Each structure stands twice: as structure tokens, then as C-alpha cells.
Amino acid sequence: MSSAPPPRRRVDLKALLGDVAPAAPAPAPEAAAPEQKGRAVSGSVKAMRLSLGEIGAKAAEAEALRAALAAGERTVELDPETIEPSFVVDRLDRGGEGEDPAFRAFVEDMRVHGQLTPILVRPHPERPGAHQIAFGHRRWRAARLLRRPVKALVRALDDEALVVAQGQENAQRRDLSFIEKAMFARALEERGFARGVVIAALAVHASEAARLIGVAREAPRDLVEAIGPAPKAGRPRWM
């Protein structure tokens, strides 16, 4: 007797949503409950369903980019002065890293041992000959301080692929604080990205994405920037 096949699209959903419990198997056709009359599917849910395949592909592309970096794919050396940061800010301490002891130690380590991991950039969409960062901002800033070329992997990325790669790389390295995630999610939404892209970039559940955006909408931006990342201040305090 053969067992029932696993639910379809489980792999795609796992790649999209990150560490999410697997969905329950779909009921057999003869056991499926009849559709309730008058129960309409919301437009946002329909849009999410329609975009699952595309967003899942973006998440898979971000994973492939990390794999390419890990495999030592051929990189190039670029002048840091011809590179711009991502168009979406994901950290609240970018301007003050020069005074951060951890960043100073990072710069010193890079001075002694060199840049061990390349950054990911794309050709700048508006400046011919320039590039824009998907991830690797700290390495780029360190290279600027050291006045050295920065090692980079160059890929043609659209806006969605860039922010998904940016968010997922952060999850793989140093986690963003709650308020940094919230402000990043809000910034993506304000730029018109679909909620599914926000979910994929932050690797969170839909409900958590809604909470992040809700807090970011209520918290005054100037107050958040004055407080900074506040890594020990979790969701309850901000709410």
C-alpha cells in the first residue's frame, strides 16, 4: 500500500516563508468539505496566491546567490566610490558605525586579513558604470575607510530580487532588531512592494509581517532613529 504524496507546492512555500511548519495534507477528494456558500476570498488573498510562484522564485534566487558566494564564484574588484547602498535602508546604525567598537574591530580585521567574502551588487539602474548594493554594506564601508577596492559579485537584479536577497542575507548573518525589521518592512511597503515580497525578504509569517508594519506605522520615525536599533527592546516594549 503506497502512502499519499506530499502536498504540492510545499517546497515553494518553505522557500518563501522560511521556518514555517509544513501545511497539513490536503483532504482526499471524497472527504473534502463542500464549499461554504457566501464565503468570498479577499482580493489580497487572491493576489497572494497569484504571486506565490513569482515570489518563491525570488527567494530561490536569493538562496542561489548565497550558494554562488559560498562556492567561490568569480568576483570582480570595484572602486567603492562608484558603489551606492541599497535603495531601502535595513539598519538604523548606518551613519554611526564609525563610532561602533564592533565595526572598528571589523575594519581592523579586514585590514589585516583582507576581505574574505564578496559583496553582492547590481549595475546601477540610473548611473552607467556604477553599482548598487544588495548586501555587504559593512564590507563596502570598511573598504572605503581602508581605501581599497571591494570584491563583489555582480548580478542583474530587479528591485524585488534585490530586497529579497538583502533581507535574507541579513537573516543569515546578524539578525536585525525588532524595530529594524519593522522599519525595513514599512519601507518596502511604502515603495509599493507586495506583502508577499515583505514576507520573503524578512522570512517571517504573514501575521508577524502585519505586526511589524503596524508598529512601524505608529512609531514616529524621528523617535525610532534617535533610539537606534535597540537590540534588547523586543516587540512587547515597542508595541
Image (cartoon, rainbow, N blue to C red):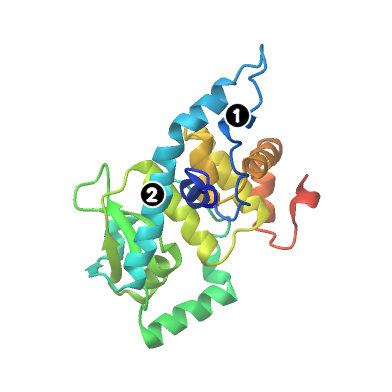
Mark before the other along the chain sequence, 1 or 2: 1
Vertical relation: 90 (above or below) 30? below
Across and down, in percent, residue 221 comes to 64, 42
Vertical relation: 151 (above or below) 237? below
Tell me the quarter of the image containing the C terminus.
top right
**Numbered label tally:** 2
Contact (Cβ within 8 Å) of mark 1 with mark 2: no
Vertical relation: 179 (above or below) 196? below
- List the single residue furthest toward the top: 38
Number of other residues with Cα within 10 Å of mark 2, as a class: few under 14, some 14 to 19, many 20 or more: many
Q: Secondary structure at mark 1?
A: helix
Name the residue type under label 2: Leu
Indicate left or right for 79 with 52 as reference.
left
Across and down, in percent, residue 157 comes to 31, 48
Indicate left or right for 237 with 182 as reference.
right
Across and down, in percent, residue 60 comes to 40, 52
- List the single residue furthest toward the left: 129
Residue 216 visible, this angle: yes
Across and down, in percent, residue 92 comes to 58, 55
Residue 118 visible, this angle: no
Closer to the camera, 58 or 90? 58
Residue sitting at 31 percent across and 64 percent down? 80
Indicate the quadrant where residue 116 lies: bottom left
- Residue on which disc 2 sits: 162
- Residue on which disc 1 sits: 30
